[in-house]
Amino acid sequence: MSAAKQVIVVGAGIIGASVAWHLAKAGANVTVVADSGAGGFATPNSFSWINASWGNPEPYFRLRTRSMAEWTRLAHDVPGIPLEWCGGLCWDLPPAELEAYAVEHSAWGYGIERVDRMGAARIEPNLTKLPDFALHVAEEGVAEPVAATQALLVDAVQRGLRMMGGTAVTALVQTNGRITGVDMSGGRIAADEVVIAAGAGSPAIAATAGLKLPIETPPGLIVHSRPYEKLLNGLVIGDRLHMRQTAEGRIIAGSDFGGADPGMDAAATGRELFAAMKSMLRDADRLELDFHSVGYRPTPIDGFPIIGRAEGLSGLYVAVMHSGITLAPAVGLFAAREILDDARDPLLEPYGLTRFAQ
Ligand SMILES: Cc1cc2nc3c(=O)[nH]c(=O)nc-3n(C[C@H](O)[C@H](O)[C@H](O)COP(=O)(O)OP(=O)(O)OC[C@H]3O[C@@H](n4cnc5c(N)ncnc54)[C@H](O)[C@@H]3O)c2cc1C
């Protein structure tokens, strides 16, 4: 039997954790190196809506819905993943566009139910402002991001993964045109393959091997209340305000699911957003703002994920994206198959790095 493949995964956010877990499960010898703890940087600041909602072309919709199905599999296989299919009530588009989205995505098989004001009130009885027309998707949900990431890494450690938290990768090591390891603050380690799953930190690492990753990192602000009695049943994707209640009981909100633009004064933006959120909820007089967070979304410039090997640089795999909470299970599964068996899933076809060369 050949020796297990040695793989270094750079990054301990939801993407690094999922890729590492799937590799470890498939028998690879995996080391995760991250300058954060288990949980990453964008991941703890995420709204964490798992969806294949409007605005996605069909191939991307298919990848997202596949990943939604893979979340159920992952939560079954990994103890302690807090996944809830709580459903999403959405009216953040003008009615005609909402209807066009319903027609298109229903034809693709998305489980959309049209609801009127009374229907919305049945789904979310504590909303003060109800839409005349909204769409409800029962199959949308949430995975609490840090707990899910940690659960993946804890389980992977039990499968033999080595975790090196608090360690920065300073450069990729290149030998005869092949990536053979990483240089870190504490020395060098060798591997058969290196996976860059370092979110916003990915371009700097890739650049050390001459590889350009075209990524932007727009900020997103989310407000977090103190834990409160249950007011929301699921995701509320309202006009200019998106909110949900976390497993801990906090109500969190952004002005869209990617978070609000923090502006010049993030604290003031947070206070305004919190007031707007509070005014949308009945029986929320004791609801208090606890803190706001600003996360940086690792977003490839065309908005779609970068998942795959780097052309002309063997031994290197890249997995960087926005919507990483939705996509993590499918990306982890497909990346592990490609790294270990050289089998690229057809759903990944549009998401290679070569598209930026054209
Ligand atoms: C405000 C906001 C709202 C969002 N809402 C949603 C949503 O509703 N649904 C959804 O699906 N997605 C959402 N996203 C996007 C999602 O959160 C991200 O796509 C996802 O968290 C990215 O995970 P990641 O593991 O790639 O990155 P991160 O969580 O940022 O992890 C990066 C990891 O790389 C490590 N790293 C970086 N550089 C180095 C280095 N040089 N050496 C060692 N380690 C390094 C870091 O330490 C960290 O561990 C949102 C994001 C934000 C910010």
Image (cartoon, rainbow, N blue to C red):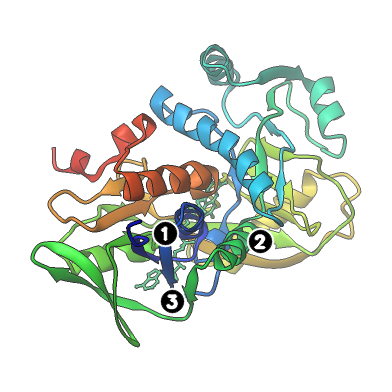
Q: Quadrant of the C terminus?
A: top left
Q: Give the residue pinned by disc 3.
A: 35
Mark before the other along the chain sequence, 3 or 2: 3
Question: Residue at 51% across / 66% down in the picture?
Answer: 40
Which residue is located at x 70 percent, y 54 percent? 252
Q: Which mark is residue 147?
A: 2
**Residues at discs 3 and 2 in contact (Cβ within 8 Å):** no
Say if disc 3 is inside 8 Å of ligand 1: yes
Q: Specify the quadrant of the image occupied by residue 289.
A: bottom right
44 vs 255, nearest the viewer: 44
Residue named by callout 1: 28
The image position of residue 208, as x and y in percent, is 19, 70
Mark 3–mark 2 Cα distance, whole angstroms, equals: 18 Å
- x then y, percent, for residue 26: 47, 52
Labelled pair 1, 3 in contact (Cβ < 8 Å): no
Q: Position of residue 90 (x, y in %)?
A: 65, 30
Residue 283: percent from left, percent from top = 91, 48
Q: Residues within 10 Å of mark 2 (few under 14, many from 20)?
A: some
Decide: is 231 above or below 349. Answer: below
Dot 3 amino acid type = Asp
